[in-house]
Image: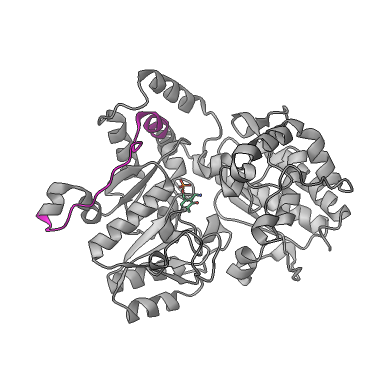
Amino acid sequence: MSPSQALRATPTAAPRTNSKVETEYRKRTVGSAKLYAEACEVIPAGLTHDSRTLLPYPIYAARAAGPRKWDVDGNAYVDYFGGHGALLLGHCHPAVVAAVQEQVALGTHWGSSQELEVRWAELVHRLVPCAERVRFTASGTEASHLALRLARAHTGKSKVVRFVGHFHGWHDQVAPGGMSHFDGSVPAGIPPSVVEQTILLPADDVGVVAATLKQRDDIAAVILEGSGASWGMVPLPPGFLTGLRATTTEHGVLLILDEVITGFRWSRGGAQARFGVTPDLCVLAKIVAGGLPGGAVAGRREIMDQLDPAAAAAAKREKIGHQGTFNANPLCAAAAVTTLSIVEREDVCAKAEATAAEIRAGMRQILIEEDVPWGIYGDASAFLVFQNPKRLRIDPADFDPLRLGFKDLKAVRDANLSHRLRIAMLSNGVDFMGAPGGLVSASHGPAEVAHTLEAFRVSVRWLKDEGDIVA
Ligand code: PMP
C-alpha cells in the first residue's frame, strides 16, 4: 500500500473488531459512517480537503457553538480544528452571527465598492505592522499567489526561496515541499518549469540562506511561515527570523511572511508583531476574514501600489493584474470587521494563548504520569503532540522540538498513529487536528481544558493497552 493509500479508508475497509479504540468510535458515529459511504460515491476519497482525512472515516458535523461542535449522531466535541484556525473567537460568536445575518439580508454580493471593505482594510492597517496597504483575496492560496506576483514584478526577478515543510497554499508554485515532495521533486500535474522557479532550503540555518542570496542575483523573495512549518510543528531556531530580515535587506530581496495561521493569533499584529520582525509583504487568511472565506496581501506601499494604475505609471512600472469575484464580498467583510474589531478591543489572543499553555502543561504532565515517551509543544495558542514514531528516547518532561528537526517532526510521521489518537479523542469528546494537535480559541475555558485533559489521559491508556505506545 502506498503512503497516500494508507492515509485513506474506503467505507468498505474491514472494521478492526479487536480494537476498542476503533469499535468505540464506530459505535458512536453510525450516521457519519453512512454519510462517508455516500460521499465516496461522488467525492474522491469522500473528502473535500486532504487534511480532513481520518481513518476509518471522518465525523460529519451538524452544528457548533463557542468551543464545541456536534456531529450528526448528536455527539458533542471540544473542537480544536477551529475552522482550520479561522475561528479565534470560537464558533458562532454572537456579534459575528448578528453581523452576518444582517448583511445576508442586505446583499451578499453587490459587485460594487462598499464601506465594509474600507473599514476592514483600516483594521488590518492598524493591527498589522507591515500593512501600509491591503488587497483582499478569496483565500490564503490566492493571497500567497498574489504576494509572489507582486514580489517578482517589484524586483524584476523570478526565483523565490521557500523552506522545506512550510505551507503556503496549494497553488503550483508552492506545491512541492509543503506537504509532500520534500526533496523538491515535481508533483504530478505541475510543470517542472514552475517548480524550477523556487529554491527549496532547510529552515534551520540562516547562513545557508545568506550564502544563497549572496551567490545569486535572480531571487525576488524569501517566503516563510513565521511560526516555523505547519503552525510551529517544526519551530524555527532562535534568531532565524531576525537573521532572515537582515540578510534579505542586505541583498535587496523581499521578505514575505505567511501569516495565514499566525495573523491575529500569534499576537494582534501576528508573528511580525510578536517577534518584532517587519516583512515587506505578508499573506493573510483565516482570522482576517472572521471565519468566513477570505484572504489578503498586505505590505509596503510601493510594492502594493503596483496594483494602482496611477501609482504604477508614476513609478514607471507595469500595473499588476488582480481580479477575483469574491474579493472582499460584503458577507465576509461583515464577519471580518466584527471579528477584527474584537481583536483590536479585547485581548482575545492572550486569552487563547493562556488556555493553550494550560493544555500543553496538562498534557505534558499526563505523559509523565503515564510513562509515555511523546512530547508536547507549541507556541502561542497552538499545541502539538509529537508521537515519536521512530521510538527515540524522549523524556516528556524536557522535550525540546529544536533538538529534533524537520525530518523527525514533519517528514517522518506515522499517520495511522495520529489517526488512532484522534479517533480515541473523538470517542472521548474531543476533536484534535491532524498534526495531531490543535488551535485554541478565546472561547475555550477551564471546563474545556479539564475535559480535554481527561480525554487525553483515557485515550493514551487505550493506545497503551492496544500496543500503540511502548514506554
Ligand atoms: N498558508 C498557510 C500557512 C496555511 O496554513 C494555509 C491554509 N492552511 C494557507 C496558506 C492556504 O490558505 P487557504 O486554505 O485559505 O487557501
| Picture coordinates of residue 405, whole percent (x, y) | 60, 70
Q: Nearer the viewer, residue 30 or 95?
A: 30
Q: Nearer the viewer, residue 270 or 154?
A: 154
Task: Examine the rendered structure and indicate whether residue 140 appears above or below residue 100.
Answer: below
- In this picture the colour scheme is one colour
Horizontal placement of 442 versus 331: left or right? right
Task: Examine the rendered structure and indicate whether residue 410 appears above or below residue 267.
Answer: below
| Residue 316 is a magenta residue | yes
| Picture coordinates of residue 323, whole percent (x, y) | 29, 43
Residue 240: in sight, yes or no? yes
Q: Residue at coordinates 32% horizontally, 53% vertically from top-left?
A: 130
Outermost residue to the top: 105
Outermost residue to the front: 41
| Picture coordinates of residue 324, whole percent (x, y) | 32, 41
Horizontal placement of 188 versus 217: left or right? right
Task: Examine the rendered structure and indicate whether residue 223 appears above or below residue 314.
Answer: below
| Picture coordinates of residue 338, whole percent (x, y) | 41, 31
Residue 446: in sight, yes or no? no
- Magenta part of the protein: which range? 314-338
Main secondary structure along the magenta-highlighted residues: loop
Horizontal placement of 458 versus 172: left or right? right
Q: Residue at coordinates 55% horizontally, 35% vertically from top-left?
A: 90
